[in-house]
Image: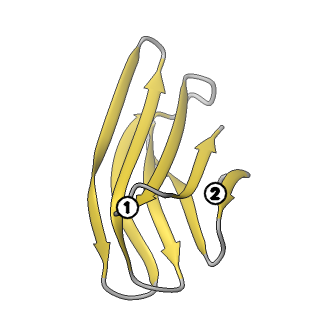
Amino acid sequence: MISLDAVAYAPIECVIEQHSLDNLTSLVATLHSDWSERGTYHFKVTTGSSTNVQAGEFASLRAGRQELSTILVSTAPDVWAARLSVYRADGTLLCESSVP
């Protein structure tokens, strides 16, 4: 499932993919780009009273899909929210995505 609330400067897109695994959902932060890129990402998932933040640097060596981070959450539909922000090395926002 691809986030419907996504902001990007084409041809680059931030996507939070969702995959069901028994009673868990895998949230995968991905970057889809038509060129190579370097920068940082910030992936935040809130579940009830807790927050999980994963952030770091990335370097895509070629165009295509790059997996940045994965977080597992409960499959209950209304107990989590996720947001992905990706920045160029100079700090310029490349794209953002959030679900639900």
Give the percent coordinates (x, y) of residue 93: 52, 55
Looking at the picture, tell me which residue is in the foreground, 66 or 55. Answer: 55
Q: Name the residue under label 2.
A: 1
Q: In this view, does 6 lie to the left or right of 25?
A: right
Q: Say which quarter of the image contains residue 69.
A: bottom left
User: In terms of image quadrants, where is residue 7?
Assistant: bottom right
Decide which of 37, 64 is in the foreground and name it: 37
Disc 2 packing (10 Å; few <14; some 14–19; many ≥20): few
Which residue corresponds to the image point at 62% horizontal and 78% vertical from the top-left?
A: 11
Q: How far apart are marks 2 and 1 (CA)?
A: 30 Å
Of the residues under marks 2 and 1, which one precedes in the sequence? 2
The location of residue 40, given as percent across then percent down, is 34, 56
Q: Position of residue 39 (x, y in %)?
A: 34, 63
Find residue 17 and report its horizontal and vertical position in percent: 53, 56
Q: In the image, what residue occupies the spot 45% across and 62% down? A: 30
Q: Residue furthest top?
A: 49
- Residue found at x 48% / y 57%: 92
Disc 1 crowd rating (10 Å Cα; few below 14, some 14-19, many 20+) is: few
Residue placed under numbered mark 1 in the picture: 90
Residue type beneath disc 1: Asp
Q: Name the mark nearer the viewer: 2 or 1.
A: 1
Q: Compare residues 96 and 66 and report the one nearer the observer.
A: 96
Q: Which amino acid does label 2 sit on?
A: Met
Marker disc for residue 19:
none
